[in-house]
Image (cartoon, rainbow, N blue to C red):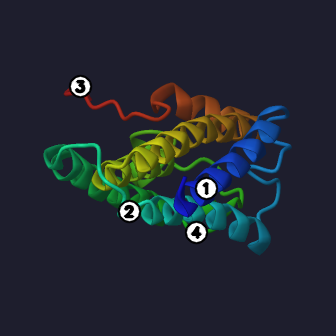
Amino acid sequence: MSGGLILGLAATLIWAAILFWSDRDPGNGPWPPRRGSLFTAAWAWGLTTLIYVGLVQTWGQPPILPALVQYGVGLPLAVAGSLLHTWATAALGLKGTSGWDVGIATRGPYAFCRHPQYLGQIVSIAGLALIIGSGEALALGLAASLMLGYGSGVEDCAIAVHHPDAFAAHSARTPFLLPRFSSRS
């Protein structure tokens, strides 16, 4: 087991524990915090960064995937996920992505789904894991993606507690994680 896998899994497990704690009392746990601060921003972004660092540190191990999957599927996913994550961060603002309560986001990618930042991170991590292609990278990518999917649900519940009326209206017309594109207006 490489140091990268240990680092990435440790950060993922810490995030998962924080999310589990938060899920037990939606809106009152450590994530999202009742009051954002530089401290909450540092640990939230720090743990997420450690997952990516751990994933990159698994590079160099023998890939178990064919090059076509690594680069033909992984590279487009990593790029698309990174672009979506960046767009969502810009639309919500750095404070909003760091735990400050900014209300219900409806601009940019938030018009298409309620948690595009989580979706972007899941897709970029999955893409990076495929590019690396090792068993450790794939295991860490899966664990981190599952944790992020869980995190989007925990955050959804907390937003519903803090902004019940606005959340009900927004969630009635905006899908949870996967955008719904149709030809109907």
Sequence-wise, the earlier of marks 4 and 3 is: 4
Q: Nearer the viewer, mark 1 or mark 3?
A: 1
Residue 119, above or below 170: below
**Crowdedness near tag 4: few (<14), some (14–19) or many (≥20) residues, C-alpha within 10 Å:** few
Sequence-wise, the earlier of marks 1 and 3 is: 1
**In the image, what residue type sits under mark 1?**
Ile
Disc 4: which residue: 94
Q: Disc 4 to disc 3, how far (Cα)?
A: 33 Å
Q: Disc 1 to disc 3, how far (Cα)?
A: 47 Å
Q: Nearer the viewer, mark 4 or mark 3?
A: 4
Q: Disc 4 to disc 1, how far (Cα)?
A: 28 Å
Disc 3: which residue: 184
Sequence-wise, the earlier of marks 3 and 2 is: 2
Disc 1: which residue: 6
Lateral position of residue 1 relative to residue 98, left or right:
left
Asked if one can make out residue 48 in the rendered structure from this viewpoint, the answer is no
Along the line of sight, which residue is nearer the eye, 79 or 133? Answer: 133
Secondary structure beneath dot 4 equals loop
Residue drawn at (19%, 28%) of the image: 183
**Crowdedness near tag 1: few (<14), some (14–19) or many (≥20) residues, C-alpha within 10 Å:** some
Q: Nearer the viewer, mark 4 or mark 1?
A: 1
Lateral position of residue 3 relative to residue 69, left or right:
right
Q: Disc 2 to disc 4, how far (Cα)?
A: 29 Å
Q: Position of residue 76 (x, y in %)?
A: 22, 52
**In the image, what residue type sits under mark 2?**
Trp
Along the line of sight, which residue is nearer the eye, 105 or 177? Answer: 177
Residue drawn at (58%, 56%) of the image: 8
